[in-house]
Amino acid sequence: MSFPVTRLRRLRKNKTIRDMVEETIVRPADLVMPLFVCPGKGVKNPIKSMPGNYQLSVDMMVENCKQLYDKGVKSILLFGIPEEKDEHGLVATHDDAIVQRTVKAIKKELPDLFIIADVCNCEYTTHGHCGTIVDGDVDNDLTLDTLAKQALSFARVGTDMIAPSDMMDGRVGYMRAALDKAGYYNMPIMAYSAKYASAFYGPFRDAAESAPQFGDRSSYQMNPANSDEALREVDLDIMEGADIVMVKPALSYLDIIRRTKDNFNIPIAAYNVSGEFSMVKAAAAKGWIDEERTAKEILTSIKRAGADIILSYHTQDIIDKL
């Protein structure tokens, strides 16, 4: 039937009927808040390029997590800024490293808060790349051993899930084997499977103090022009034991989220990254957009594209308004 028999505006007449036929709903349970922990005590360093976000010392992180939990945030993703760095990222592999201390402190106060630990080396290496450098580039296989050690340490201190973001070939299988051998076969892995070499990461590198000291990450992160390759990456991670696969960034890669959803029967995460967040904040500060409406629309678009889990810096501002 066509107009005038069919009038689609009938289902938009008022809020009640619009809510009744709403197709995509973002729930508080869908959202994960990324957080940055740093050395010291009583530290709350504003991240200038990410308004409303901070580098927090362990004690301040615990207090911040209590406030987030009371607002309805049930899951966080932790990134660490260490006291010192080394050439390989080994500072992140022991049970008293910055993220590990934070996990233990949070779990003592908030045992039900779901903690995801990012597994990578860029915050922990002197050169800012995601692994061990050999002949000017990251050596894939040498890096796998460091990543596995980091994952095992996170498991020992009570982390609920690990999220490898390094984009080394074979790292999911390597970590899965190491975790299973050590008895941590119930530790879920959320793999950054389709992680692109994106320009949208700039503010994050300020927050995590992880900018590469030379070159870029194009030899291991994906070419933004490639879509078919993303499906190959996802397929490999699933075969290696990933429980959840991630697309990062989200907004410029909604097509990748959709293709992943259409091709794989597995939970999909999407990372609404720092640059995407900061653009909204900047435009809102100028009065050019309505921040709350824009944030809700962005999160809805990511969910509509097929994401089951959304990692977003908007989480702390929006979760109690959903």
Image (spheres, rainbow, N blue to C red):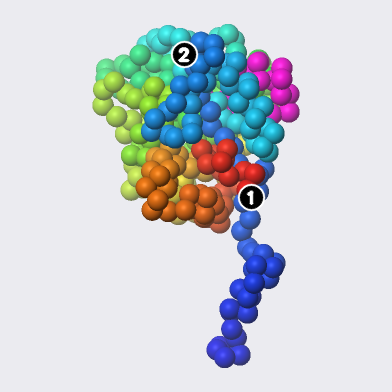
State which quadrant residue 224 falls in.
top left
Q: Earlier in the sequence, mark 1 or mark 2?
A: 2
Image coordinates of residue 133 in percent, x first then y, are 33, 17
89 vs 171, nearest the viewer: 89
Q: Is residue 9 above or below residue 318?
A: below
Crowd rating for badge 1 (residues with CA inside 10 Å; few <14, some 14–19, many 20+):
few
170 vs 312, nearest the viewer: 312
Q: For residue 322, which numbered disc appears in the image?
A: 1
Mark 2 — residue?
82
Q: Is residue 19 above or below residue 273?
A: below
Q: Is 137 contained in the magenta span?
A: no
Q: Residue at x 47, y 13 (%)?
A: 82
Image coordinates of residue 198 in percent, x first then y, are 36, 39
Q: Secondary structure at mark 1?
A: loop
Residue 194 in the figure: left or right of residue 112: left
Residue extent of the magenta highlight: 102-119
**In front: label 1 or label 2:** 1
Crowd rating for badge 2 (residues with CA inside 10 Å; few <14, some 14–19, many 20+):
many
Q: Do we see residue 101 in this rendering?
A: yes
Q: Residue at x 43, y 34 (%)?
A: 50
Image coordinates of residue 294 in percent, x first then y, are 48, 53
Q: Secondary structure at mark 2?
A: loop
Quadrant including the N terminus: bottom right
